[in-house]
Amino acid sequence: LANIKFLNKQDREALLQYTKHFVRKAVQIIVQSRLGEKKPTKSRVYAYNTDWFNLSIKDIAQITTSTKSSLGNIEALFSTQSTPFCVEISLRTPENQTMILETWCILFNDQQVDQSQKVCYQVYKKMSLVLRSLLAITRAIPTYQLSRRQNSDTYVLLYRMYCGEPVVHHLGENYATAKIGTVGT
């Protein structure tokens, strides 16, 4: 995201609002895809005021609360150079053995600036596109199928959120990474 201190007040407030809702919705998408439930969403002709980014995904209160407490003040992330917000997904067996399966990161990078972008429309539209891509990808990788088979007798998937560098040493030497999208502002 652009260096926010150079934006006018209206664009700054809009960008902070969009970013806050973007992060919260991204976490909802990631965590809900690992709960093991198939959640079809019906299309609507018109979005409701609560449908940020035109996604009709009902927020789960516990996930929203965890996100708010882990994320803290969104403005603090803008002031700290390149501090990622991470969501870690792990598997736990009934014997309390755990294995980290994946780590999702949202990175705020003020080096990728597109001066031609208007915050009000273009950024919102691009954030919406990234979230739709995230929705598809979280359900296309193997962890989603693993989550569909979980139960308390075999294993359950858990999540943890934190701000800081992603912890990836537990993923092994040949772990794969992929960039879902970029929103220049």
Image (cartoon, grey):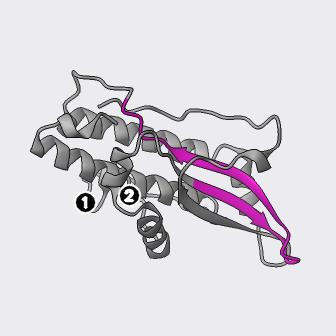
Please tell me whether residue 92 is drawn above or below residue 185 in the rendered image: below
Q: Mark 1: which amino acid?
A: Tyr
Q: Is residue 63 visible?
A: yes
Tell whether position 153 is magenta: no
Question: Which corner quadrant of the image does residue 115 belong to?
Answer: top left
Q: Is residue 6 left or right of residue 111?
A: left
Q: Residue at x 47, y 33 (%)?
A: 181
- Nearer to the camera, 119 or 80: 80
Residue holding disc 1: 48
Q: Which mark is residue 68?
A: none
Q: Main secondary structure of the magenta part?
A: strand
Residue holding disc 2: 56
Quarter of the image containing the N terminus? top left
Q: Residue at x 66, y 35 (%)?
A: 177
Callout 2 secondary element: loop
Q: Position of residue 51 (x, y in %)?
A: 31, 57
Range of magenta residues: 87-110
Q: Position of residue 93 (x, y in %)?
A: 84, 71
| Precedes in sequence: disc 2 or disc 1 | 1
Quarter of the image containing the C terminus? top left
Q: Position of residue 157 (x, y in %)?
A: 71, 66
Q: Is residue 80 left or right of residue 47?
A: right
Question: Which corner quadrant of the image does residue 59 belong to?
Answer: bottom left
Q: Mark 2: which amino acid?
A: Ser
Instruction: Please say if the residues under marks 2 and 1 sit with CB atoms less than 8 Å apart.
Output: yes
Q: Residue at x 62, y 33 (%)?
A: 178
**How far apart are the two marked residues, 2 and 1, measured between alpha carbons?**
8 Å
Tell whether position 91 is magenta: yes
